Amino acid sequence: MLVYIKLLLAAMFWGGTFTAGRIVSQHLPPFSAAFFRFLIATVCLVFLVRKMEGGLPRISKAQVTQVVLLGLTGVFAYNAFFFTGLQTVEAGRAAVIVATNPIFIALLATLLFKESLGSFKVMGIILSVSGAILAITRGHPFHLLSEVVTWGDVAIAGCVASWAAYSILGKYSMSILSPQAAVTYSCIAGTMALFFPAMHEGLPGFVLTAPPLVWLCLVYLGYFGTVLGFTWYYQAVKSIGPSRASVFINFVPLFAIIIGFIFLKEPVDPSLILGALMVSGGVYLANRRSSGTS
């Protein structure tokens, strides 16, 4: 029972990252916001890995390249897009777009690893992408190429692309390293890569000028949204299997919409709710076959 409570809380934490990120993005430029988030996360992860596994394992030269690529895709690129997009895109709407991640990961896996694309997966992909388009265009899908779609939406779509690349790269790295070690190394690499563009944005000045609420949100993003969320998720994967654990990710856009409404007073229109349900349903359908065999 405890593992399912932790999974639900992890989904809630991830849903909350969109509201926290929206608040932070109104005060800090993208690279500085991402650097502070992952500096906090990296410190916590290093401590956690030392406590759980006795420290970070030594890695080979080939693994260094893998870790750097993980950091550049899952930390550097993803968060640059994340904080750029959230400057203009509402938290709930951004979460619905990002929730299509498993669909594009499945498509990449099909292209790169020749994984089968069954009927459930095809229906899931169509339903999920349609839901995302409905949310992006605010219920007017035929306006997809008009002014309804903003550069903020494009940036959030960049999150999907970078996370799909991170996930495919992680398929190799996590076969050798533990999930915690791979995430920690990728956070270290990504934080180092973020440092220089963040300095160009005037990073030191933000330490003194950022209001307390921003620091609170950064701690939330770094600890709850990154360290605790991923730790509990990977514990669940080990305990009940990836198929059952991944179902809980479908709650993320719904939590994001609710939290955005409560804390940011963001409007909740029918197209957003319907889009979130379609995306979640599509992700479930795409993984239905594997769920039945776990």
Image (cartoon, rainbow, N blue to C red):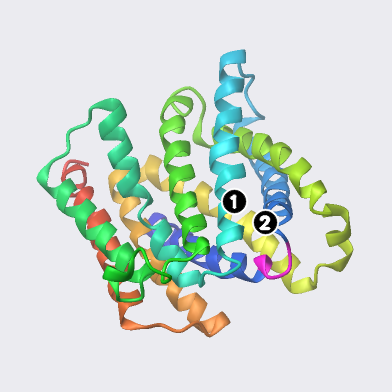
Note whether residue 52 is visible: no
**Could you tell whether 126 is left or right of 225 in the image?**
left
Packing grade of label 1 (10 A; few <14, some 14-19, many >=20) is: many
Q: Position of residue 70 (x, y in %)?
A: 55, 34
Asked whether 42 or 108 is in front, the reply is: 108
- The answer to whether residue 25 is magenta is yes
Quadrant where the C terminus lies?
Answer: top left
**What residue would you read off at disc 1?**
79
* Type of amino acid under label 1: Asn
Helix, strand or loop at label 2? It is helix
**Could you tell whether 244 is left or right of 92 in the image?**
left
Asked whether 285 or 96 is in front, the reply is: 96
Give the main secondary structure of the magenta stretch: loop
Kindly give the residue lying farthest to the front in the view shown.
146
**Could you tell whether 86 is left or right of 233 in the image?**
right
192 shown above or below 154: above
Kindly give the residue lying farthest to the left in the view shown.
119
Q: Which residues are magenta?
A: 24-28
Q: Position of residue 157 (x, y in %)?
A: 45, 54
**What residue would you read off at disc 2?**
30
Residue at image point 52% right, 56% down: 155
Residue at image point 28% right, 40% down: 107
- The answer to whether residue 21 is magenta is no
Q: Position of residue 92 (x, y in %)?
A: 45, 71
Packing grade of label 2 (10 A; few <14, some 14-19, many >=20) is: many
Report if the CB atoms under discs 2 and 1 are less than 8 Å apart.
yes
